[in-house]
Image: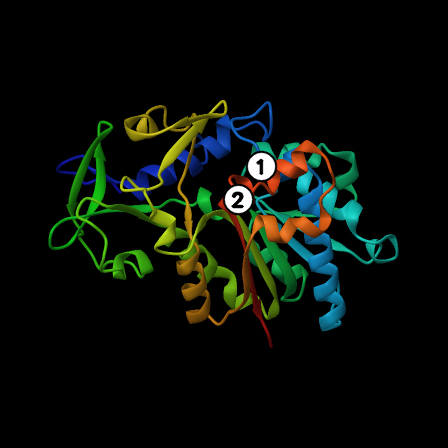
């Protein structure tokens, strides 16, 4: 919360308010859709290839573990991914499919529910615990571009320690950290140069820890842009924080302008996700590029080729698979 004496607000509090405030936050009031007519596009709005790949992963998990086909998609976007997954599930398995979407954005949930192909096949939930209860704790959980939407804490290295980013009237102030530093491979790395900025998705870990006790077993598939540490900050001394508005990439002070009217994001440190998962009882089974994950399913379309391009989305996005067993 803002400091009453100085009116400083820690950046993750600012980002939480700008994106997720129930009345004025971007995901609550400004976002209307995802794709060409929105502020940004996702893999699922460009092609159905991701749906094919996830459908295969989910059906293989169900068959291997002899479980019901319980799917939980976290952050459903405009519903395109759910449509393509359901269509890609083999017909003889589709009638046994239990598909849940967990989404806190009312505008996007309404967009999903307007799709006729989803209305009779999907159950919507506002919280993970509710979806897991309906699955009796066993589910294949997945997300696409979810982690990057969680508020980040931003740090900058000095000669002797890390300072944390606070804002006042859209002006940056880096101050000594007022509490214990969060757990992160980026903070533990000793070779960062003075002035290096990093972002830590601490809020994502805290969110996961709220519902992990309700998840008995299954697979967690996380797709997002980023990399392992230290590669995630290769040639990025100013870090990866940025905003998007009408498909325009905004950096520096533009990120802090128009709060609630634009998306704010940062690359995902997959080393943190792996280490946090290990501490919370998850086993990492694989980490690969989107190119490797999608290639067995692509067509010859320009959109599919774009999504696996080695100098673009194909390697910028990573696919992390983790599991929990009873």
Chosen colour scheme: rainbow
Indicate the quadrant where residue 66 lies.
bottom right
Secondary structure beneath disc 2? loop
Looking at the image, residue 111 lies above or below residue 298: above
Regarding residue 262, the answer to whether it shows in the image is no
Q: Disc 2 or 1, which lies upstream in sequence?
A: 1
Q: Are marks 2 and 1 in contact (CB under 8 Å)?
A: yes
The CA distance from mark 2 to mark 1 is 8 Å
Q: Residues within 10 Å of mark 1 (few under 14, many from 20)?
A: some
Looking at the image, residue 13 lies above or below residue 23: below
Q: Position of residue 240 (x, y in %)?
A: 36, 41
Q: Nearer the viewer, residue 209 or 303?
A: 303
Q: Residue furthest bottom?
A: 326
Q: Residues within 10 Å of mark 2 (few under 14, many from 20)?
A: some
What is the number of the mark on residue 145? 2
What is the number of the mark on residue 88? none
The residue under label 1 is 42
Secondary structure beneath disc 1? loop
Q: Position of residue 272 (x, y in %)?
A: 39, 59
Looking at the image, residue 32 lies above or below residue 198: above
């Amino acid at each position: 919360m803002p400091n009453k004496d100085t009116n400083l607000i820690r950046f993750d509090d600012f980002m939480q308010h700008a994106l997720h405030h129930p009345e004025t936050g971007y995901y609550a009031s400004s976002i209307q859709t995802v794709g060409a007519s929105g502020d940004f596009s996702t893999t699922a709005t460009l092609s159905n290839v991701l749906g094919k790949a996830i459908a295969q992963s989910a059906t293989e998990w169900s068959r291997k573990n002899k479980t019901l086909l319980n799917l939980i998609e976290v952050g459903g976007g405009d519903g395109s991914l759910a449509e393509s997954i359901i269509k890609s599930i083999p017909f003889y398995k589709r009638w046994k499919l239990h598909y849940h979407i967990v989404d806190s954005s009312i505008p996007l949930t309404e967009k999903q529910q307007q799709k006729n192909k989803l209305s009779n096949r999907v159950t919507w939930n506002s919280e993970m615990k509710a979806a897991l209860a309906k699955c009796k704790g066993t589910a294949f959980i997945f997300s696409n571009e979810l982690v990057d939407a969680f508020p980040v804490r931003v740090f900058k290295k000095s000669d002797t320690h890390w300072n944390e980013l606070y804002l006042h009237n859209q002006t940056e102030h880096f101050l000594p950290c007022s509490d214990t530093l969060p757990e992160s491979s980026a903070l533990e790395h000793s070779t960062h140069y003075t002035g290096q900025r990093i972002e830590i998705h601490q809020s994502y870990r805290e969110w996961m820890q709220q519902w992990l006790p309700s998840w008995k077993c299954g697979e967690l598939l996380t797709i997002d842009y980023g990399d392992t540490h230290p590669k995630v900050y290769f040639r990025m001394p100013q870090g990866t924080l940025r905003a998007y508005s009408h498909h325009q990439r905004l950096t520096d002070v533009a990120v802090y302008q128009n709060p609630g009217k634009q998306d704010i994001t940062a690359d995902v440190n997959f080393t943190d996700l792996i280490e946090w998962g290990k501490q919370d009882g998850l086993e990492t089974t694989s980490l690969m590029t989107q190119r490797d994950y999608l290639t067995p399913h692509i067509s010859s379309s320009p959109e599919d080729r774009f999504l696996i391009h080695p100098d673009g989305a194909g390697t910028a996005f990573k696919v992390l698979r983790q599991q929990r067993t009873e």
